[in-house]
Structure formats: structure tokens, C-alpha cells
Amino acid sequence: MYVTQGLHRAVQQNPDGVAVIFGERRRTFRELADRVARFAGVLRTLGVHGGDRVAMLSLNSDRYHEYLLAVPWANAVLNPVNIRWSPAEIAYSLRDSGTRVLVVDDAFAATLPKLRRECPELATVIHAGDGPTPAGALSYEELISATGPVDDARRGADELAGLFYTGGTTGHPKGVMLSHTNLAVSAFGVMSTGHWLTIGGRYLHAAPMFHLADLAAWNATILTGGTHVIIPSFTPVATMTAIAEHQVTDILLVPVMIQMLIDHPEIGEYELGSLRRLIYGASPIPQSVLERAMKTFRNASFTQAYGMTELSPVATLLSPDDHQKSELLRAAGRAAPHCDVRIVDVDDNEVPRGTVGEIVARGGHVMLGYWNRPEETATALRDGWMHTGDGGYMDEAGYVFVVDRIKDMIVTGGENVYSAEVENALAAHPAVESCAVIGVPDHEWGERVHAVVVLSPGHEVTVKDLRAHVKSLIAGYKAPRSVEFVDALPVSGAGKILKRKLRKKYWGTDRQVH
């Protein structure tokens, strides 16, 4: 298998079908393939050779879609850049990957002077925007117009497809190496369940296209000849407008996006009945938010995907049928068809069902390794199993319940507290819009449970009331002993709360446990 294979099939079977919709631009599969072949020709003319990395720093667009296809067509390697990083972090990833060609849009053109200073090996910048081409950059559209199409290199199988850098929550970002086989195994695995995406449907790219969660849906849509509807970035209004105007059938969202949608006061004014499948993941979702979302999008089936970049990215799935059972709404699902999953102790021995341990996964979707980091690769990949760093347990029916990142476990007064459980209880309070729970130093308890809370607009609540509410739902020792109210929580480009930033003010060192 190779990433571009689905495009060839679509051109053969449905050349005049709509391949992509972005704003006022619509292109057929035939037109898309021609532009992809021409951009691949551009890359080869610029000296891109087999295995060279080509980066893209851009909001979602039809040109991003073309980039994802043209780079492997040119026998090169994808390097999508996290758009929420600082210029310094972006520069680090470009240097670390040895990237010599960068594609950038209007939104990030202003970062070019700094990136050029910090990345002297960056030979070529291509401007893929609709505004004026920045000084020192080449115009994407002019290059395509002036360059003829080239044959697809059909880069595939176990060759490197892309470098996907982790969010950098601990130290420098790591480049996760995924092969074409890795991506294909994950895509075929989820599609074989029959509830991942609508065959030949319309998938909306509202989540960032640099992130592997959206890329997983992109890849499945390519394989099955669906239409890509693209908006530059997620906002509730843009998302609802796109669903209504283009009769979108499928979407992938992270929990914070789901909450913003269902909380929007105008959601009832949009016709969203075309939506048939809603996939969510990347971070835990409060059960109360999930239940509200299922009532709001009554025509859509819900599927939760749990995994990580290193797993291309899916490990487990909570099916639409599972969502009809209230006792499973907090589960991450069962092993996807392409994945082996088990729960192990510190010595990698499988633990009894119901016992908390580390979630590990094995299969053809497991990464090749970390770019230029053999020691960290060896630590993560032991005996063929990817060690996720997530703590969880498996019940007798094989459902996995994620209780926390292992490093986020709080030990208070000799008791283990998993923050996800506390966060779920807090989120059920009507005054809580979002929250994060961390362990902070405490003279008496070693660590105390501390909550950082964003209040819902127009609501007020006391610490005493929140503690009482949590105690009504879970054990008293798990209730936060202290609460901090903030305007917003720090989040990564994937929508995950950056707890390390929250802890830093309390611990001040790399050691953040007692």
C-alpha cells in the first residue's frame, strides 16, 4: 500500500466526482490528481530526492490536501508542522528533521524571517496562500502552472511516509516515524468495523490537518473515494455552516470542540441533520458533555478512538452500540481489529482484569521509531509492544478504561488518585466549563489534589461547593483540597491540556512527585 493509491483509484472510477471543497474552490479527482502530479514535479525540480523531508506550516486548506499527496508522489517524506508551536519550537523541528523545503501559507508568512535565521539549512520556502508572496519565497500557484506533471513514485510499504512530531510536553519534540504500511494498517483496521466513516461520504476537516487524528480520517477518506470538505480552522460557526451548506456526513472532533459546539447559543439555527458519524478522541471527554452531544446530534452515531501518534494513531474503539450503554461511556473501547492491547505492570507482565497498569499495544500500525533517538525508541518499543505511558485497566469483556497518564497519578496520604476521575466529577457541575486536576506539593499529605477550573459564563461557585459536589460523586479523599480559577487552560495543538505547564508554578523542577 501507499498513501496516493486511493487517489489513483478515484481518478479511474470517478474522475469527475468532487474531490475537495474549500471555500469557493471545488476540484474533481481528475483536477486534483493533475495538481498533485505538478506539485510533485515542482519538488523534484527543486532537488527533493527520495526520503527528503518536506514540511508544511499552514492552516487547513485544499493546498494542504495537495501537499499530503504530492510529497509521497515525489518520493519524499511528509513533515506537517504543529501550528500552535512558537517559532523556536518550529525551528527546532525543522532542524531536527533536516528539512530543506518548507511550504507556508498567509497565516504564518510573518514567521519566515525568524525561521530562516534559525534554520540556515532551509533552502526553499514555497508560499501556498492567496495573498502576496513574501520576499524570498516562491509562489505555489506559479510553480504549479509552470511545471509539468510527473509520474507517481508510488513510495509505499515500509518506506517512511512521514515525521509527525509530538507536542513537546516533555523536553524537545520527538519525530515519530510512520511508514505507509503503518498508516494503511490503521486505516483499514478502523474502516473494517463499518462505523468509522461513510463510504463515499463527505468528511469535514475542522480539526487541524497537521495532527495525526485528522490525518487518520483523511487517509480513510482517500482510500474510500470520499469528498474532503475543508475549513481553515475550527470555530463553532464555521463548522456548523460547513455541515449545513455541504451536507457533511462525517467529522472528527476533540472533546473541547464538541463542548464548544453544543454550548453555542445558535446551534439550533443550523440544519445539521446530514451528519451521520462523529468520531472523537485525543483527550478524555466528561460523560456529561458526551451525553449532551448525543442528544444534540441525534442522527449521528458516535465512535471514540483512543490511541497516540506512535500508533498511527488508533488502538481502541468505542463503537456506536457501546455508546448506548451508560456504563461504557467512560471506556476507551476495545482493541481495534488491527491492534493487540494489554495492560502490564512495571515488569511488563500482564495484570489481572480490573487492575490498573500501563496500556501497551502491538501491531502493524506501531511506529518505526523516533527520528534519530534510538535509546528512546528502545524504551518505548519493548518486545514489539508500544508502551503508551497511559494508566488504565481492562474489564472482563475487554473494554479498556483509561484512568490517567501514569505520571499524572496523584499519591495523597498513601492513596492513589487518578485525575481523570476527579475531572469527570467536576465537569458535571453546571458552573464548570472546563477543568484540569493535578498533584501539587503538600506538607501534610505529600501531594494534594488541586483543581484548575474555568467557570461557565455567568456562573459562580465556591471551593466548598465544588468539594461537596465532587464528594457526592466519588470518594471524599479524591475531592480537590484546593481550587484555582483561571480564564483559560493551556492546550496543545491537538487540544490536550498541558498539565506540565500547570504543575510548573507549584513544583518548579522536573521532579513533580513526592
Image: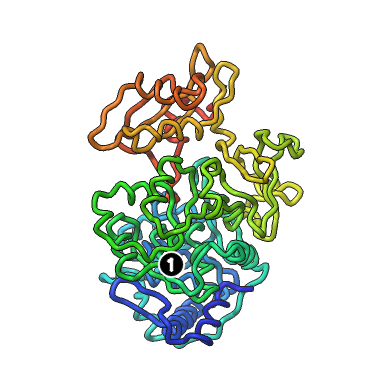
Residue nearest the observer in this picture, 27 or 293: 293
Q: Is residue 399 left or right of residue 477?
A: right
Q: Is residue 247 left or right of residue 494?
A: left
On-image quarter of the N terminus: bottom right
Counting the numbered discs, the total is: 1
Residue nearest the observer in this picture, 387 or 129: 387
Q: Is residue 512 above or below residue 293?
A: above
Q: Where does residue 335 sit, x and y in percent of width and height? A: 65, 52
Q: Is residue 26 above or below residue 299?
A: below
Task: Name the residue: 30% across, 46% down.
Answer: 263
Residue nearest the observer in this picture, 286 or 149: 286
Q: Where does residue 119 sit, x and y in percent of width and height? A: 45, 58
Q: Amino acid at mark 1?
A: Tyr
Q: Is residue 198 in view from this perspective?
A: yes
Task: Name the residue: 35% across, 60% down.
Answer: 112
Instruction: Residue under label 1, please give it.
Output: 203
Q: Quadrant of residue 272?
A: bottom left
Q: Is residue 94 in view from this perspective?
A: no
Q: Quadrant of residue 465?
A: top left
Q: Residues within 10 Å of mark 1 (few under 14, many from 20)?
A: many
User: Secondary structure under badge 1?
Assistant: strand
Q: Where does residue 411 sit, x and y in percent of width and height? A: 57, 23
Task: Name the residue: 43% across, 81% down.
Answer: 32
